[in-house]
Image (cartoon, rainbow, N blue to C red):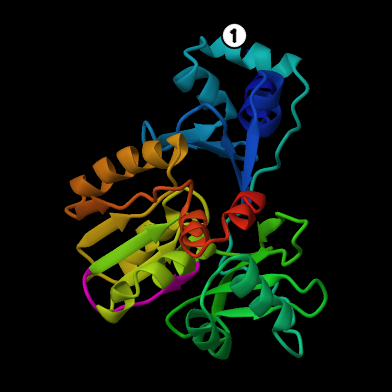
Amino acid sequence: MDKQLIINARRASMENYIKSTGGTLLKEGRQYRVEGRSGLMISGNKWYSHTRLKGGNTLDYLVEMEGIEFKKAVEILSMINTDIVPPVMPSGIKNISVPERNTNDKRVIAYLVKTRGISPETIIPLLRQGRVYESSVTHNCVFTGVDGNNSIRYIMQRSTSPASSLKFESQGSDKAYSFSLQGKNDIVYVFESPIDLLSYSCMYSHVLLQESHMLSLGGLADIALEAYAARIPCIRHIIFCLDQDSAGKDAYTMLSKKYVTKGFKIGCHFPQQKDWNMQLLNQIGLKNLAEHHM
């Protein structure tokens, strides 16, 4: 078989292939979750299955996940309309695009307090530390992830407009440094998003008083958790506080197995509502806002 066909099959776009088979892609930062295919995350020509704890390129996916014979898989990828993803060259720390801070944070405060129901007591310290702020041009809510030198390595932005559900990671963000609140004990509470993390901290303030760690995954992939646990070796207990849906439950099942084998004690706390922000809004009587911003 032509070697170039094989190379092109390996570099074929996973996103286009999944779409060609009728799959639905759900954006999560710089990658996609495939709806209905439990734990499958894709980006460019790469995929990773949290169900099987394995990944690879597009050709690998057809052979290993769909059971298609190698030669047939190459033929399929050569016949459908798939973009060729150029190989990525290894590099050091990427320069992250950090949005300029606005002269005030009024829109972010209004969004987090009035729309999301998060208490000012939770937000103000983070604004002072620069962990949360308002961007000057778009007025987005900016959540920052920092390294041991307090340098920004990760940024999640969320629109403050009531009519928008826009959220994305800034270019150059390193998911290993996703938004977190560092504690001092051996417990880390793990969430899907910064909003859920802050919502939980409002309802269960004793977690912060006990000096537990709190971490947002920025989705359901565990890149941030692996890196956080490696940076802070005192952590021995992981409590997953993921969404109350099939994706969250599937992720908990997969991740709990993975981290038990690594020697961690595992627990879970699921919200009664779809996610922790909806739970907070229901608790304070703002259910309609919760449903609007899903």
Amino acid type shown at disc 1: Lys
The percent coordinates of residue 58 (x first, y second) are: 59, 28
* Residue at horizontal 66 percent and vertical 12 percent from the top: 75
Q: Is residue 96 visible?
A: no
Determine the residue located farthest toward the front in the rendered image: 285
Relative side of 32 to 136, left or right: left
Residue 271, placed above or below residue 170: above
Q: Is residue 184 magenta?
A: yes
Q: Is disc 1 placed on a helix, strand or loop?
A: helix
Location of residue 71 with respect to 254 vertically, above or below: above
| Front residue of this view, candidates 149 and 293 | 293
In this picture, which residue range is highlighted in magenta?
A: 179-186
Q: Main secondary structure of the magenta part?
A: loop
Left or right of 173 on screen, residue 78: right
Circle 1 is placed at which residue position? 72
- Residue 17 shown in magenta: no
Please provide percent x and percent y for residue 66.
Answer: 50, 16
